[in-house]
Image (cartoon, helix red, strand yellow):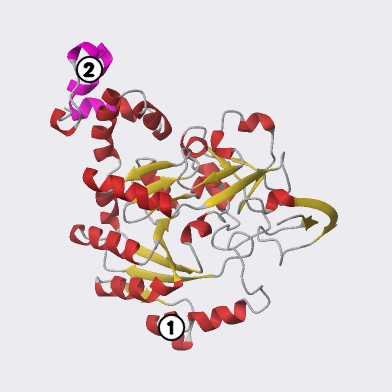
Amino acid sequence: MVDPTEYVSFSILTVSPFELFLLTANACVLDVLFGLLDPHEVMRFHRVSQRTAAAVQFYMKRAWDLDTYLHRWFDPPLVHDFYDRLDENNAIVSGSAVLRFLQRAAPYPNSDLDVYVPLPGLLDMGRWLQQIGYRYKPRGGGPLLLFDVAALTLPSRWMVSRKNAPQSYNTLMFPTLYEVFDFERPEDPVRSRVQVIAVEGDPREHVLTFHSTVVMNFFTGTYVASLFPMSTFHAYIAWACRSSGYADYRSTASWEAKYRKRGWRVVRHWQTADSENFGELDGLRTIADGNTWFLELTSEEDRKKVREERELQDLGFEIVTAARGPTCVGTCMTIAPPFTVSACAFVDDNEYDDEWPYGGTLETFATFGA
């Protein structure tokens, strides 16, 4: 039953019979009722009135309990330490583990926890994982068998990788530099693995370069965000943003079959009918706009401060669909910094794998004013 002391008091004369039912129902009844709705419908129901919002918030505390969800990877006393590490290092968590959490489902049996951390926070994050019992599992040989050595030499390896890149570039417009560091707890009954992915720049920009919109979800130490909630959790559509010929850990060859098997419809060829009523696909957006679905992890008194900080750290991006501008072959949209891709025009056919971050064969383009 909803605790009336946590919410604004309501006059009995203003409460409808259904709202009264919601406010007086016990937790089991609300769990069954809201469990019949998909996550996007739950959030829409939240906006109906203050009374329904109170009932939804009461349900959400149990349905989206991130502390409990993370017990797969961290002992209960360490979960909030992990949140602190995320915020201290400007890191985020993304990938299928976050997708499952937002679906109100348990993690997949072999699911990894993918932590995206800017280069300055890599050493601190990796050392903390080792302190709590994780072991570093190197992918290479030689001196890279030691995590500290691998982390401290990463900048020099990146200098070699980017020798042909411009002095200054945006991670949305050029292939993002990254390196994956694996940490495991082999003694756990169910394998626990954390992948620390070192990235250059803002990890949220990195999320915007993923293979499709279905995995563009993440959480920080203070909130969870889904950038395309209506497509992902209501329509079950994965809008493809990368060519099928482009392959790295963000876009493996098997991702399409994997997400089709899990129930999503992968859309590679744009059709206007597919996009009807999807306001989240409308051109210019920001991460903190009204189309993004947020779940705050902080206490009620801290939420205003968190929202203000989130707005100050907002990140703009533009969605260019095949109906509006240039997209990579085999994709239905491009996500990039505002006004960069929409200012392009096709002039010829060539392979531009190096210059175009989305992979595959793309028409040569000329930019105007970008």
Q: Quadrant of residue 171?
A: bottom right
Q: Is residue 23 magenta?
A: yes
Chief SS of the magenta region: helix
Disc 2 secondary structure class: helix
**Residue type at tag 2:** Phe
Residue 31, position as x, y percentages in the image: 26, 30
Disc 1 secondary structure class: helix
Write the start and end of the magenta stretch as one range.
Answer: 12-32
Q: Which residue shows up at 73% across the image and 55% down it?
A: 369
Q: Which residue shows up at 35% across the image and 73% down it?
A: 126
**Residue type at tag 1:** Leu
Residue 179 in view in this figure: yes
Mark 2 lies on residue:
21
Residue 183, position as x, y percentages in the image: 36, 70
Decide: few, some or many residues near mark 1? Use Cα within 10 Å; few <14, some 14-19, many ≥20: some
Mark 1 lies on residue:
152
Which quarter of the rendered picture does the C terminus lie within? bottom right
